[in-house]
Image (cartoon, rainbow, N blue to C red):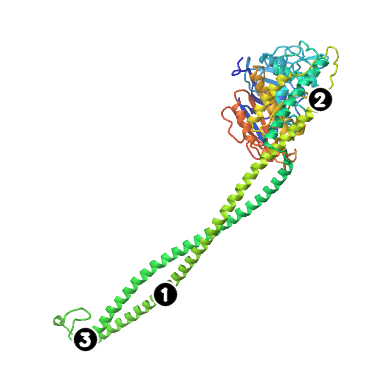
Amino acid sequence: MSISDPARFLLRRLAITGPGKKLVTLMFGERINVIWGASNSGKSYIVKALDFMSGAKTPLPPITEAQGYDKCWLELELPVTGTVTLERAMKGGDFGLHIGSVDPESVGRPDRTLSWDHRGKGESLSGFLLGELGVGAKEIARTLTGDKNAFTFRHYAAFVYTEETNMMGEWSPIRISDRSGETFDKNVLKFILTGVDDSAIVTTQNPDSQRTANLGKVEIVDEMIAAAQLEWERDYPGDPDLNDQAEKQTATIRDLQQTMSDRQSLLDDLRLDRRAKMESLRDAQERRTEISLSLQRFALLKSVYESDLQRLASLEEGGAALLAGVRRPCPLCGANPSHQLHAHGIDEVEITQRAVRAEMVKIASERADLAKATRSLEAEQEGLLKRAERLSGEIEDVDQQLDEVKPQEVATRRTYEELDAARFVTRQGLALRQRIDELHRRKAQLEAFKAKSLPRGSVTSGIDGVTGHEFATTVQTVLHAWQFPGLPTVSFDDKTHDILIDGKSRRANGKGVRALMNAAFKIGVLLYCRQKELPHPGIVVLDSPLLSYRDPLTSRHGELGADEKQVKDSGLKEHFYRFLVAQKDQAQFVIIENDPPPIALGEGSIVTSLAGSQGTGERRGLY
């Protein structure tokens, strides 16, 4: 089968039923599935249920929410048979096999019965699933003397389902169970990565071969030391004390951070002050504009008052002339003396004069009030002018201060960035120095090696150096795609059959980094099988691979270590999910996490949220 079209399984639905109980169901997309939410919401229980429905002997844990439920169902799509549905009692035992997709609440008897034990009589679940992958009867050596066990689907399951405890464990991810043994675990990995089982027992190495192999390892380590030493001498000439540099750089950066904070605060205060003064200046200018308009209207009104007074004075003067008998146009109707048909009475003229004088007094009073209001506005206008001039000067002072402080802040920030870059180089050097020291320790161990005469008929266990190197390269590709901090060199430890990151073993890292190493290992097994056209179920279920992103205040796993903090700050989480999206056609992924994915996962993916007993949401938990 080609790499582009591998035989693979697909999880479709997990269901749990019980008499009179509500159906519990969880659907899976064919590409990426993320189940996230609060603790104690059933996330880890899902992994146990999937493993249980793949043939695990141990029954499901009797949690409170499961009371009253008695049967578990798993719908799968297989490469040969197509869609099938497995049923099994939650207490364990054999499986019922239904062809096609069925309704767990109304289905009849199963089409076939499959034994949970690969060694049981009749057809077993393990034999059925292995047959779907094209894997026949295979044998795995469990001891150096050549004792063998049959290869079962349960051995694949150790690389398909990874629970949280195993995810962060200090032991090698190849461990099948607590009782399987190191030799057997190594040989299972060898079969999965090579397709070669132990039906023909491998000849035991003699002492000369052991010494030759060990010398080859010493040569490889020497080459690695020489390459690392050359890099050290090139990038860090003069053998500087990087620990002292790192301490000084950290202290200087701490001081620069405080200086940047102080200068930024000063800039913020100056900008706020300038904004307030600009608003005050704008208010003063707007008020001056209003006053100017009012003064223009007052001037116009004053001219009206002057005109009215002149007119009234003329009326008063004409009335006086009438009283004196002067022949002139009538001050009341304007008629010329020759057209005046009757003489105005003295009383009538006097009444008119009194009215005119009263009106003149009124207008004079209003003109005086207008003059008072005009003087008040003119005084206010003068005050606003002085205020505007003062504010303009203060704004110029603030602008000058800003011009002085801005370059200082920019210079400080530039110095900080340069120093931070230098500190990064220093830390890279410290990591290189640590790798060189680790390689020297490894060389010392190899040089202290003493060949052992193994019993007659014994066998070598595990994979060879070439396969281990190729596999480590595959895992390194995964970690680099995740943007693992430092883009480390991954090597294969033939002793533990585990990976080393820059020469560091699993035990030398924090829980979060161990979880990432385990996840990369399991995904690396799948990708390596695809590259070599070897069988693999095509499913990877990981519980808490991104443990480094936990909240140390709420997580039961405690504070983050230095290496975990480095991972958390690196942005690896987004690259992790982007990598899964890129591999979506190679396998089906099920990720159990506390937080939702930071990116959209695309078509064929499902994100399920479990809010927990104290949370809010459409679904509190699995049940």
Left or right of residue 93: residue 421: left
- Say if 126 sits above or below 379 in the image: above
What amino acid is found at the position of numbered circle 3 in the picture? Leu
Say how many tags the image has. Answer: 3
| Residue found farthest to the left | 338
Q: Nearer the viewer, residue 282 or 323?
A: 282
Label 2 sits on residue: 447
Q: Which is more foreground, mark 1 or mark 3?
A: 1
Label 1 sits on residue: 375
- Say if 219 sits above or below 594 in the image: above
Is the C terminus in the top left, top right, bottom left or bottom right quadrant? top right
**Mark carried by residue 561:** none
Task: State the image coordinates of residue 209 (x, y, percent, origin top left).
Answer: 80, 16
Label 3 sits on residue: 322
Left or right of residue 405: residue 464: right
* Crowd tier of the residue under label 1, counting other residues whose Cα lies within 10 Å: few below 14, some 14–19, many 20 or above: few
Left or right of residue 621: residue 317: left
Task: State the image coordinates of residue 202 (x, y, percent, origin top left).
Answer: 78, 12
* Crowd tier of the residue under label 2, counting other residues whose Cα lies within 10 Å: few below 14, some 14–19, many 20 or above: some
Which residue lies at the image location 72% right of the left edge and 28% below the top edge? 226
Q: CA distance from mark 3 to mark 2?
A: 145 Å
What amino acid is found at the position of numbered circle 1 in the picture? Arg
Q: Label 1: state its secondary structure.
A: helix
Looking at marks 3 and 2 on the same chain, the residue that comes earlier in the sequence is marked by 3
Left or right of residue 553: residue 338: left
Q: Nearer the viewer, residue 345 or 486?
A: 486
Q: CA distance from mark 2 to mark 1?
A: 106 Å
User: Quarter-wise, where is residue 565 in the image?
Assistant: top right
Looking at marks 2 and 1 on the same chain, the residue that comes earlier in the sequence is marked by 1
